[in-house]
Every structure is written in C-alpha cells, then in structure tokens.
Image (tube, grey):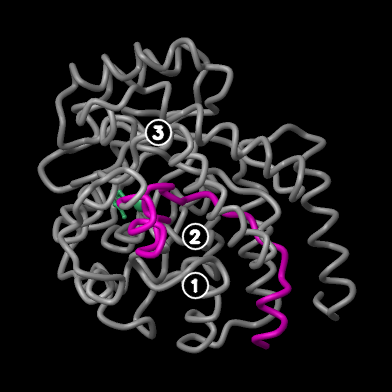
Amino acid sequence: MEDFIRHLPKVELHLHIEGSLEPELMFELAERNNITLPYANVEEAREAYHFHNLQSFLDIYYQGANVLLTERDFFDLTWAYLMRCKADNVMHTEIFFDPQTHTGRGIAFDTAINGIYHALRQGEKELGITSQLIMCFLRHLSEEAAFETLEQAKPHLHRLVGVGLDSSELGHPPEKFARVFAEARALGLTTVAHAGEEGPASNIYDAIELLHVSRVDHGVQCTQDPALVELLAQTRMPLTVCPLSNIKLRVFDRMEDHNILSLLDKGLCVTVNSDDPAFFGGYMNDNFLALNRALSPSKEQLTQLTRNAIEAAFVDKDTRQSLHQKLDDFSANHGVH
Ligand code: ADE
Ligand code: ZN
C-alpha cells in the first residue's frame, strides 16, 4: 500500500509557501542575508517545532519568514517546494502566500510575488507541474490593512487566481473581511478561507455566506453541526484538510481520531494537503502515509481523495480533464475500481 501511495498522482490545494521553509534553507538564507537566527543550528530549530495550538505555531512560523529578503530568496523557497512536489507525484498545486508577513517588515509586495511566480512558471516548464497562486490576508490584522494589500496586488491580478484568509482564527471571524472579499470578487478573484480549523462550525457557514468561498480550508470542525455536514455534502463544497497539521496543532489528539475518512464516506469533497510541511512533519506523501498507518484507507478511498482535489482545483476544463486522465490511467494500472 505504501508504494501505491507514493505513486498515486496528487493535487495539493492548501500549502503556505512560507510554511515550506525547511530549517536547512532557513540557515542558508540567514547566512546569505546576514541575519542572526534564534537557533544555534538546524537541530535546535527542529527541536523548537513543538506546538500546543495554532498560535504557538504561528509565532515561530512568522519568525522563520524573516530570512526572506530578496526575489531570489522567494524563488529558492518556491523551487525547493516544487522539487518536493516532483518527488511526491504532485501534478498540480495551488499555493498560498502571506504578503503582509513580508510588507510588514519592509519587503516589497513585488519582491515576494515576483520570486514565487517565476519559480512556479519554471516548475511548469521544467517539471511539468501546473500551479496557481492565492494571496492570503492575515486575519489578526485590520480590514484596512487587507484593503491596502489588495491595492498592492492590483498590478499582479493576472498572476493570482484568488484570495484567502489565514492566521489566528479565534477572535477574527469571517465577517471582519466581508467587504474586502467582496472587492476581491469584483476584481475577478475567487475566494477561499481558513474556517473550522480551531474555530467553531459557524465560521464555516459564515465563510460560505459572507465571503462566498469556493473552498473551505480545513473545515474539520463541521462535525459539530450535522446540518452543516449535510449541506457540505449536498453542495460538494471542498474542504482542504491537512492531516499532519491537525495532529501537530492538536486539533485531533491522534491520527486515529481524524474525521477525514468518515467525511469522505458521507460524500463530502474532502482533500489531503500539507499546509506547512517544514513545520508539521512532511509533504503530500507523508500526509497520505500517516493517514494510511492510522486509518487504513482503501485504494478506492485514496484515489477518491485525489479525484476530489481535481474537482476542487481552480483550473480550466482542459487542465481538469488532463488531471482526471492521469488519475484514471494510474487507477486502471493499479486495479482500482
Ligand atoms: N498560516 C499558516 N498555516 C496556517 C494554518 N494552519 N492556519 C491558519 N493560518 C496559517
Ligand atoms: Zn493553512
């Protein structure tokens, strides 16, 4: 089964590029940019990656991003992630970046997006991995700051497929960003939002009703409300679930307790994603393998997880068709019905 999982074609829809900064690259960039890190070495950094909730992670995550200064740094970060995609048979990826994490410390919006975007284009040409870019607003910052960020994005709209909402969920509900999301939609951007990760099921309703999201990031708290689970199944609203992240941030105590397969069996469009792989113990294969060890999914369930991600991807008809074809070919070759 582990071999099957490693070779399974995959689509990733929930990945924070800043969360793919491995300690090795963090040290390399710190040296290149003359920055002193709060860790003596790579091992000490990894040792610090023990979290008790979302906020305890975010504090360390934002600190790590301080080593990213130049376009080349953002390029190298994104390229390193794409190499992991290649190794894990990820055919298509839709990545988040947090412009405010960078503009807030004096790095230009253009510096971040140029580096990331050029790496994504090179990944398409040289690795055959298609991609999309989603800009997230930090929800612990103000509505006004989000509007400013949207303004900075205007010269780059052709490079963005949508906007998202991340950072501290508790105390920062979707309604705070209803107006800036409305403007983003008016500019032709799709919308997604983190909701129901640590926060209540009502945040999932509100992301759908007030932010008009096309996908919900995480969403695993939906099981607090059976009517919501029913609605998500009926509408096939995609949930971008992140199994290893949920364990590291104590959303579930143990992978054996994770609800992804039970939601899958109820007909929800759940997908598997790595969120912040450098901090949570792994990339796409690691997430699928961890699910396999704890929950023993069938080959049909595993392929359905990729089929859901293809259904939920922000791609044109031809790209979606070609992704489905690759998965169908794999299934036929591996006796999946
Ligand atoms: N930013 C990076 N990872 C995140 C997560 N899991 N939840 C909220 N904000 C994030
Ligand atoms: Zn996330």
Disc 1 target residue = 287
Q: Which residue sits at x=72%, y=81%?
A: 4
Disc 2 versus disc 1: distance between alpha carbons? Answer: 7 Å
Mark 1 neighbour class, 10 Å CA radius: few under 14, some 14 to 19, many 20 or more: many
Disc 3 versus disc 1: distance between alpha carbons? Answer: 31 Å
Indicate yes or no: mark 3 CB to ligand 1 under 8 Å: no
Label 2: state its secondary structure.
loop
Q: Quadrant of the N terminus?
A: bottom right
Q: Please report the bounds of the magenta region as a residue range.
A: 1-30
Mark 2 or mark 1, which has the lower sequence index?
Answer: 2
Type of amino acid at the residue the image marks with label 1: Asn
Type of amino acid at the residue the image marks with label 3: Thr
Q: Which mark is residue 73?
A: none
Question: How far across and how far down the image is residue 303, in percent?
Answer: 69, 69
Q: Which quadrant would residue 108 be assigned to in this image?
A: top left
Mark 3 neighbour class, 10 Å CA radius: few under 14, some 14 to 19, many 20 or more: some
Disc 2 target residue = 273
Disc 2 versus disc 3: distance between alpha carbons? Answer: 28 Å
> Looking at the image, can residue 255 be seen?
yes
Question: How far across and how far down the image is residue 246, in percent?
Answer: 32, 68
Q: On screen, 59 above or below 9?
A: above
Disc 3 target residue = 70
